[in-house]
Amino acid sequence: MSSRSSLTTAEKAALSIIPANQNPLWEDLLPGGFHWSARIRRGTVLRLTAQAADANLAALFFNAEEKLERYNAPDTLKAQHTAFLTRGHVCYSDMGRILCSVVTDTTGWNDAFCGVSDAEQIKTQYGLRDFGAARNGMYRSGREGLLIEMGKWGLGKRDLVTNVNFFSKVSADDTGKLIWNADHAQAGDIVELRFEMDTLVILSAAPHPLDPATTYDPAAILLSAFAAAPVAANDVCRTSCEQNGRGFQNTERYFAAMPASSLHSSNQAGA
C-alpha cells in the first residue's frame, strides 16, 4: 500500500472517524524522545498526530485489569495475513482478544516487528547526553523509555515484548536487509486507535531503531482522546478478515462474562 502522506493536513483530518465538531476528552503533547503511559477505557479513540516529519511512536498494550494478557505481535500479523498495520487491522492480545483497532491511518503503513533502540545504539549513533549533563535535553532510547513507563505499573524487562512502531515504514532490499523508509510520515499524519478493552498503553517517541539519522531530533506526537461511537456490524476492522470477526466476538464475550462489580471498577479508571 502506498503512503498517503502527500495529502494536505485538511485532507488527512477529513479521514478521521471523529466528527470535526467533537471536542477531545483530553489532549497531551508527547515531546520527541519522551515516554508516556496511561489506562485508556474501552470505547475511547486515541488519536496520534505527528508534529514533524519522520515521526516514530513505539507502543505496547496490556489488558488494564490483567496485565499478564498483553499485545502479541506474531498472532496479530499471522491472524490478519499482514507484515504491517494500517486501517482495518487490529492489535490482538495473547488470549485472542482485541486490545485496539486501527480505525484511521493516513500513512498506510506502521512497522510491526523492528522493536526499539537501546541505550548503546543511541550512544553510538548520536553521542552521549545524559540527564546529569543535559536534563530534559538528554538522549533517550526507546527501550529505556518503555521500561521506565512499564515500571510505574509493576512491569519489567520480562514483560517487554515486540512493540508497534506507528508512523514508521520498513521494507526489505534484494538481499533481505530491512531498511527504514525516510519521509514516510509527515507533519499532520494521524493514526487513530479505538480501544476495544480497558488497556494500559505504554509509549515512547524515541527514534526508530533503523533510522540512520546522526542528529537526535525525534518528532513530538500529539495525543488526543475522544469518545468512540459503538462498533457497527459493518465496521472496517471487524469485517477486514474472517478472523477479526471472531476476535471481536471473543472480546465482547469477555466483557459480557465479567461480573458487574468488575465492570464498575473498570469503568472508573482510564480516560
Image (spheres, rainbow, N blue to C red):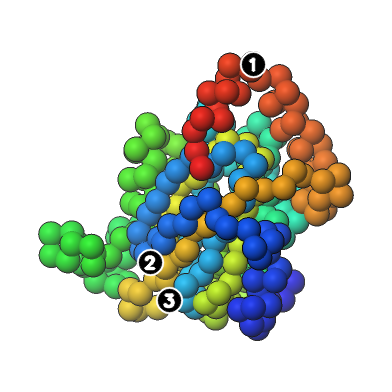
Image position, residue 28 (x, y; %): 43, 57
Binning the other alpha carbons within 10 Å of mark 3 as few (below 14), some (14 to 19) or many (20 upward) gives: few
Q: Which one is in front in this view, the residue at disc 1 or the one at disc 3?
A: 1
Given the image, on which type of amino acid does mark 3 rest?
Pro
In the figure, 57 relative to 170: above or below? above
Look at 46% across and 65% down and name the residue there: 221
Image position, residue 50 (x, y; %): 51, 69
In the figure, 177 relative to 95: above or below? below
* Pointer 2 residue: 32
* Pointer 1 residue: 259
Label 3 SS? loop
* Pointer 3 residue: 212
Given the image, on which type of amino acid does mark 1 rest?
Pro
Label 2 SS? loop
Q: Nearer the viewer, residue 143 or 27?
A: 27
Quadrant of res 119: bottom left
Binning the other alpha carbons within 10 Å of mark 1 as few (below 14), some (14 to 19) or many (20 upward) gives: few
Binning the other alpha carbons within 10 Å of mark 2 as few (below 14), some (14 to 19) or many (20 upward) gives: many
Image position, residue 266 (x, y; %): 55, 28
Q: Which one is in front in this view, the residue at disc 2 or the one at disc 1?
A: 1
Look at 24% across and 71% down and name the residue there: 127
